[in-house]
Amino acid sequence: MPDLSIIILNWNTQDRLVKCLESIFSNAPQCEFEVIVVDNNSEEDIADAMAQFEEVLLIRNDYNYGFAIGNNIGYRASTGRYVMPLNPDTLIYPEAIDRLITELETDNSIGIAVPVVKDTKVRPANYTFAHLYFDSIVYRNISNLFDRYRRSVAEPFDVELFSGTGYICRRSALSEDKIFREDHFLFGEEYRLCREMSEKGFKIRIVPDAQIHHFASVTFKDDAERLVVASRLGNVVQWEIRKERLGSILGILTGLILWMEQLLKLIFLRVARTFKTSKQENYRKLEAQSSVAVSSLFPLLKDQSRFQKKVNDEARLYFNGGKEREAPIVNGFADLNA
């Protein structure tokens, strides 16, 4: 049995995937490890690209099940004592994995060891609930003012929440059959994973000297329509997380604050786009995201559960070219055993 299972979920990111795998094997950890690539029914044929990595187990899904289910399929095929969900748009730097494993081996109370993005300032303030799930323009700018007085942290430290990729989980701290809850097609996975770790009494530790490179949002940022679908789902998931964390009243109140900010931003962008011809494409994408946030408020207030199902169904169909899988749907997703 390997010490570590690295699970990479791929969807139409062949070039990034190859570079990610090259970085893993070029900077291979000292422990025994396996790499499992789960292809979520990509339009690309990655067979030729994967031929150079004979030691990698490739699992081909016949349907795009989304992030949580896709990773869970890889998890059930893995055997390592530690499990590393890794985005394909990631590069591993030398000794990063070894440093995460060492942290886990040193302290059995750690459930997840988390790397940091290279050349970023590592501060505990970046791992608070407000920083991660209250994406307020005003709050962000106020926080940035204080950042100049906050020192970067070089030593490992424990947090309640994190967001990102390349973290390593202790298998014994996870559920037997899954890493992530399968509530949504995409987003919110790390939040619920963190909550489950805390409930089980395990620590989440940030390891500053374990560094990776992450080309965030590669799947969405170059496609305007795809960005809109993802933004709508992101808004729904974050609305649910804030209500779950803060309670209904504060959850809705924070949602209203963010809605007002996005409304003002939308008005500004529409006015600015009439004058700034050199930034039309950038403004158009920002405008689309703000428009999604503004239009999501009233459906969420009226019937949150119904709107969540609608948005998840929309995302699932969009990322599968409008096709349904010919299998029973359980909680919004296809029954893989059918």
Image (tube, rainbow, N blue to C red):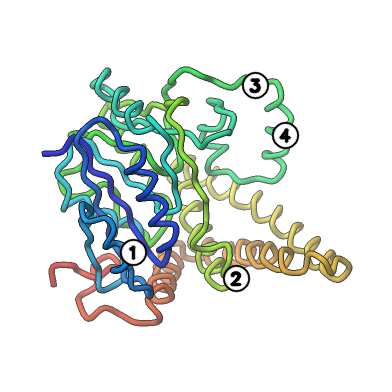
Quarter assignment of residue 111? top left
Q: Residue at x 72, y 60 (%)?
A: 263
Is residue 69 something that shows in the picture?
no
Separation (CA) of disc 1 from disc 3: 44 Å
- Which amino acid type corresponds to the residue marked 2 in the rendered image? Ala
Q: Position of residue 174 (x, y in %)?
A: 22, 39
Q: Residues within 10 Å of mark 4 (few under 14, many from 20)?
A: few
Q: Disc 2 marks which residue?
A: 224
Q: Do the residues under discs 1 and 3 have CB atoms within 8 angstroms?
A: no
Residue beneath disc 4 = 142
- Mark 4 to mark 1 CA distance (whole Å): 46 Å
Circle 1 residue: 49
Of the residues under marks 4 and 3, which one precedes in the sequence?
4
Mark nearer the N terminus (4 vs 1): 1
In the rendered structure, find residue 150 and report the number of the disc placed on it: 3
The image position of residue 165, as x and y in percent, is 41, 44
Report the amino acid beneath label 4. Answer: Ile
Q: Which numbered disc, 1 or 3, marks the residue that appears first in the sequence?
A: 1
Q: CA distance from mark 2 to mark 3?
A: 36 Å
Q: Quadrant of residue 190?
A: top left
Q: Is residue 28 above or below residue 218?
A: above
